[in-house]
Image (cartoon, grey):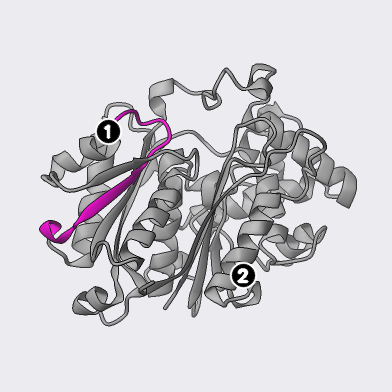
Amino acid sequence: MGEVCVIGVGLTPFAKYRDRSLAEIGWPAVKQAIEDAGVDKRDIEAAYCGTALGGMMAGQRVLKMLGITGLPITNVENACSSSSTAFRQAYIAVAAGAYDMVLVLGVEKLTKFGGGTLPLEREDFEVTHGLVMPALYGMRARRYMHDYGLTEKQLAGVAVKAHRHGSRNPDAQYRNEVTVDEVMSARPIADPFTLLHCCPSGDGAAAAIVCSAKTARKYTAAPIRVACSEVNSGKYMTGFRDMTSPEITVRGARQAYEEAAIGPEDVDVAEVHDAFTIAELLYYEALGFCERGDAAGLLEDGETSLGGRIPVNPSGGLLSKGHPIGATGAAQVVEVVRQLRGDCGDRQVEDARVGLTHCTGGGISGFDHGACSIHMFAT
């Protein structure tokens, strides 16, 4: 397998674009990535588009706006992991030598649903009994609080950090700072969550130009190397599930670190799937940034804040940057690539050399999560 690099990234700021079509949301991110890479669109040999709820032929609908047609376009659906799974397919294609340069796109327009929780499959047993995502993560939070003594104030601190970081990100959906009191007094959603414990619904797109290392050197002296690419599915379990330890992420992280020959202690910056506040704490532990039960201490000590040992979600994460689900995985790649380049201004992680992205996808009974994608990048 050959070495794979990212040489260009682009992002449509996450927001609510009620008057724009999916294609109108998506094409600016692609154009930005192409211009960032300094390549000709005619040099792109294939495209991989991730979207969960964007409908049929999303990639073709977006790319026709830029005259990028006639090439192989693969559309990928894998819940919230859709565009990070698309990135994995692009990585494999380039590493195997099938293509020299490909495009990855993630795009979503959630405002078409008018708000509320994401529409899940009604044929699923747990969904028909009301187990929407806020309820599921609320149960995870309560179990973790019971087992490890996490307090509601500590849990609210995740949202405070997210918004503090997001306030520095011009592409974030919400760029306001919040206090612990504001988080705890916001509108109740699913105990112990209030509105600010939950990621917002919105629209957005992200894109990346992926190519071989040989090709990358024609365009830049400092390409960002893809150190590993992992996508896993969850294990089906009909009995007890430990809600405080996401098995799929633990397993995926172990495989990613082995593939990259990098340990959790080597990661300088991480973008993780904090769809709800408790999720970020669970992923600190699952990704090996601390021991089980120690996540709250890691947060309170400032270790995962900008300036700390392992800044997590300097973009603001899903809680502040937003979560147009099909675009999220690719947007995490955009943030980490920019961090490793040193292009993030007020939210720049100092001396960042190794970055990690982590994105899961759930909503199926019997699974911890249906999908989990982990990528690592290095200068």
Residue 185 seen from this side? no
The residue carrying pointer 1 sits among few (fewer than 14), some (14 to 19) or many (20 or more) residues within 10 Å by Cα, namely: some
In the image, is 335 to the left or to the right of 184?
left
Labels 2 and 1 touching (C-beta < 8 A): no
Percent position of residue 167, x then y: 49, 53
Of 215 and 10, which appears nearest the observer? 215
Residue at x-position 75% and y-position 50%: 245
Magenta segment, which residues? 41-57
Q: Earlier in the sequence, mark 2 or mark 1?
A: 1
Specify the amino acid type for callout 2: Ile
Residue at x-position 31% and y-position 64%: 94
Quarter the C terminus occupies? bottom left
Q: Nearer the viewer, mark 2 or mark 1?
A: 1
Specify the amino acid type for callout 1: Met
In the image, is 269 to the left or to the right of 329?
right
**Residue 186 vertical position relative to residue 148 in the rendered view, above or below:** above
Residue marked by disc 1 = 57
Of 15 and 105, which appears nearest the observer? 105
Which label number is shown at residue 310? 2
Q: Residue furthest bottom?
A: 221
The part of the image, by quadrant, that contains residue 216 is bottom left
**Residue 82 vertical position relative to residue 41 in the rendered view, above or below:** above
Please tell me whether residue 42 belongs to the stretch shown in magenta: yes
Distance, label 2 to label 1, CA atoms, is 39 Å
Of 131 and 306, which appears nearest the observer? 131
Percent position of residue 69, x then y: 13, 44
Residue 51 seen from this side? yes
The residue carrying pointer 2 sits among few (fewer than 14), some (14 to 19) or many (20 or more) residues within 10 Å by Cα, namely: many
Disc 2 element = loop
Quarter the N terminus occupies? bottom left
Please tell me whether residue 192 belongs to the stretch shown in magenta: no
